[in-house]
Image (cartoon, rainbow, N blue to C red):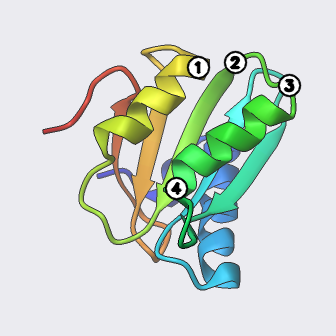
Amino acid sequence: MTESSALDPEDRKIVTLARSARARNAVPEGAAVRDDTGRTYVAGTVDLASLKLSALRTAVAMAVASGAASLEAAAVVGEAASVPAEDLAAVADLGGADTPVLLAGVDGTVRTTVAAGRAES
């Protein structure tokens, strides 16, 4: 477990942004990613009849659509105990296998950090 207060300020920022997206949109998850230039992309879960995307995949898609060439880090806030392999794959596609993905609870406390290229079981 990583205390949010001990995080790098830029990582703390994406956790805060992800938490805000979750609360503001009243969705199960909020996510934020930071690209290689320091820009951030924030999203919530998409749950439409014809389109369902996790918050993290939505944030990655927003980064790609905005021209991001690479990712430095990602954060997900919600109640899940792990990051799904599909979400990690999306981050790895743009950021590489070593891109850190922070998983935080709804209170913003980071529970774990996993490299995007390592699918959890």
When the figure is inspected, residue 7 is found, relative to residue 67, above or below; the finding is: below
Binning the other alpha carbons within 10 Å of mark 1 as few (below 14), some (14 to 19) or many (20 upward) gives many
* Label 4–label 1 contact, CB within 8 A: no
Residue position marked by numbered label 4 in the rendering: 53
Q: What residue is drawn where x is 44% and y is 16%?
A: 98
Mark in the foreground, 2 or 4: 4
The kind of residue tagged 1 is Gly
Q: Amino acid at mark 2?
A: Ser
Residue at 68% x, 59% y is: 43
In space, the residues marked 4 and 3 are separated at their CA atoms by: 20 Å
Instruction: Identify which amino acid the numbered label 3 is placed on.
Output: Gly
Q: Earlier in the sequence, mark 4 or mark 1?
A: 4
Q: Which residue is mark 1?
A: 95
Q: Which mark is residue 70?
A: 2
The local secondary structure at tag 3 comes to loop
Q: Nearer the viewer, mark 1 or mark 3?
A: 3
CA distance for labels 1 and 3: 13 Å
Q: Is residue 48 left or right of residue 42?
A: left
Give the farthest residue toward the front.
50
Whole-percent x and y of residue 30? 57, 64
Between the residue at mark 2 and the residue at mark 4, the CA separation in whole angstroms equals: 20 Å
Compute the Cα span from label 2 to label 1. Answer: 5 Å
Q: Which residue is mark 3?
A: 67
Relative height, residue 30 to residue 1 (above, below): below
